[in-house]
Image (cartoon, rainbow, N blue to C red):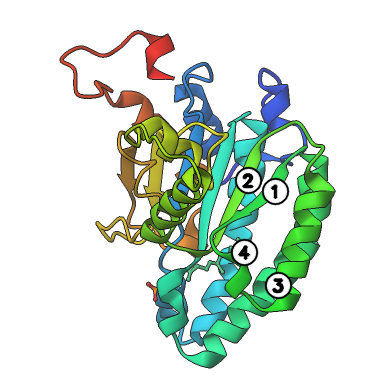
Amino acid sequence: MPHSRLHLPTLPSLADGFGPITAEESDLLEKLDLSRLPRHIAVIMDGNGRWAKRRHLPRIAGHSAGTQSARITIETCARLKIEALTLYAFSVENWRRPKAEIEFLMQLLREYVRKELPLLQRNNVRMRFIGRPEELPEAVQRETREATAATADNSGMILNIAVNYGGRAEIVDALNAIVAERNGHSAHAPISEEQISRNLYTSDIPDPDLLIRTSGEMRVSNFLLWQIAYAEIFVTETLWPDFNRARLLESLIDFQKRERRYGGIDAPPASAAR
Ligand code: FPP
């Protein structure tokens, strides 16, 4: 009975404000161990174009529909008290798309950021943007700066929206920052992993422990290349606009079934796994 509705009095923080919870979501929540959730979830939101094509709609209709899935994912993760969520909205490679689609995506992003601010404030979310902002249209930069400032004092989940983001570009930026920092100093210690991590866009948050990719593609697509070294990867056939709370809960349940060994032979103690 996936569509019958009931409330979950035992999980007030999750059910509160979510509106009605479906029986399917309730079943999934029962299977979820709320004490072993990933700290940082990264998502490659893929399949908007195919979703639209199947409905004989223009590709941009898929992107518009995809904003609903982003909203559900953000709100659910915030209520589950996930520390950080990173959504891949626009890659450095996406400039190769038709001009009209790029313009639509930029406009959508501006509107999205503005429209979602109340939801982010309600859920105590800190919104940030990772990537190379200087190459974005000025109007987008203004909107993203304002949203970052408006939510900076929140204390809950960190939401990173990756815009004009590339994993290799991020590593190049980190190395350039290290080199610039060294200029003028004569003796150099070798560059360490820790130093690179400290200079990434995500320097103050843990690496993702779960990477979700929708629409079935088995690719990493230049996303958080350094940070996903030990991430569990969950690929679902579901297209991004169809990705909802139940599909997100399924990915979390699947994550909890994995044995994380970090190159060792036994699962590490819970504290090391974090
Ligand atoms: C991939 O679909 C999706 C994107 C290019 C990212 C854009 C995502 C959204 C607009 C969702 C809303 C989220 C925010 C934060 C504004 P695709 O076009 O690559 O799909 P295809 O592979 O089926 O062609």
> Which of the labelled discs sits on residue 140, or is there none?
3
Q: Within 10 angstroms of label 2, few (less than 14), some, or many (20 or more) residues?
A: many
Of callouts 4 and 3, the N-terminal one: 4
Residue 1 appears in the picture as rendered: no
Q: Residue at x 66, y 70 (%)?
A: 109
Q: Position of residue 202 (x, y in %)?
A: 53, 42
Q: Position of residue 144 (x, y in %)?
A: 72, 62
Amino acid carrying label 4: it is: Thr
Q: CA distance from mark 4 to mark 1?
A: 16 Å
Q: Residue at x 77, y 68 (%)?
A: 142
Of callouts 1 and 2, the N-terminal one: 1
Pointer 4 residue: 67
Q: Is residue 259 above or below residue 271?
A: below
Pointer 2 residue: 159
Q: Residue at x 79, y 64 (%)?
A: 114
For the residues carrying marks 2 and 4, which lies nearer the camera in this image?
A: 2
For the residues carrying marks 4 and 1, which lies nearer the camera in this image?
A: 1
Q: Residue at x 56, y 42 (%)?
A: 85
Amino acid carrying label 3: it is: Val
Q: Are marks 1 and 2 in contact (CB under 8 Å)?
A: yes
Numbered disc 2: secondary structure: strand
Of callouts 4 and 1, the N-terminal one: 4
Q: CA distance from mark 2 to mark 3?
A: 17 Å
Q: Are marks 4 and 3 in contact (CB under 8 Å)?
A: no
Q: Position of residue 166 (x, y in %)?
A: 42, 61
Pointer 1 residue: 127
Q: CA distance from mark 3 to mark 1?
A: 14 Å
Choose between 216 and 12: the one closer to the eye: 216
